[in-house]
Amino acid sequence: MITQRLTLRPWTAAELDDALRLWGDADVMRLLGGPLSRAQIEERLARESASQAEHGFQYWRASLRDGDTFLGCCGLKRTPEPDGTIVVETGFHLLPSAWGRGFASEAARAAITFAFERLDAPAVYAGHHPRNDGSRNVLRKLGFAQIGERFYPPTGLVHPWYRLGR
């Protein structure tokens, strides 16, 4: 996917170093349960590739359109609700150098459009760490409404849970 400033595309096996830089970064992962090990990151990339192959989406690699400067990832995943229903969830993880520049909103908007137009999803869901004001602001800016809370095992905390309907 191409936006005004970004390219979102599937990860390749050759991009492990970018994935290590992102998911191994203490600042990026501070509110997501902590940095991942190399083995965990390799597993994460394998899950993303499997999701892309099976469902046509993942947390895509995000870069600047002009020059392929790596920024992080944004995309979609299948998430089970407590009743067993599977919903489409969006999320974004950006390197600190990309924070505060509108990239999360721009990338998430593209992922949401993909969910509605290509997947015909009736709604998109999202969550964030209770202290992540940046993510909270992005979700509100995009029109998400908080509908409850969900336990997030990597942090051991209950996180706000949001929904954006068509």
Image (cartoon, rainbow, N blue to C red):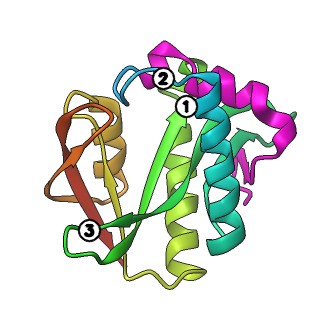
| Crowd around label 2: few <14 · some 14–19 · many ≥20 (10 Å) | many
Question: Secondary structure under badge 2?
Answer: helix
Q: Residues within 10 Å of mark 3 (few under 14, many from 20)?
A: few
Front tag of 2 and 1: 2
Residue 33: horizontal and vertical position, in percent?
A: 36, 27
Q: Which residues are magenta?
A: 1-29
- Write down the residue under mark 1: 94
Is residue 131 found left or right of 143 in the rendered image? left
Amino acid at dot 1: Leu
Distance CA(mark 2)–CA(mark 1): 7 Å
Q: Relative to the observer, which residue lies in front, 108 or 148?
A: 148
Residue 13 shows which numbered tag? none
Residue 148 spot, x, y in % from top left: 12, 57
Q: Residue at x 81, y 35 (%)?
A: 15
Relative side of 148 to 140, left or right: left
Q: Which residue is mark 2?
A: 28
Image quarter where the C terminus lies is: bottom left
* Residue at numbered disc 3: 81
**Residue type indicated by callout 2:** Val
Three-letter code for the amino acid on which mark 3 is drawn: Glu
Tag 2 near tag 1, CB within 8 Å: yes
Question: What's the distance in space between the residues labelled 2 and 3, CA to CA?
Answer: 26 Å
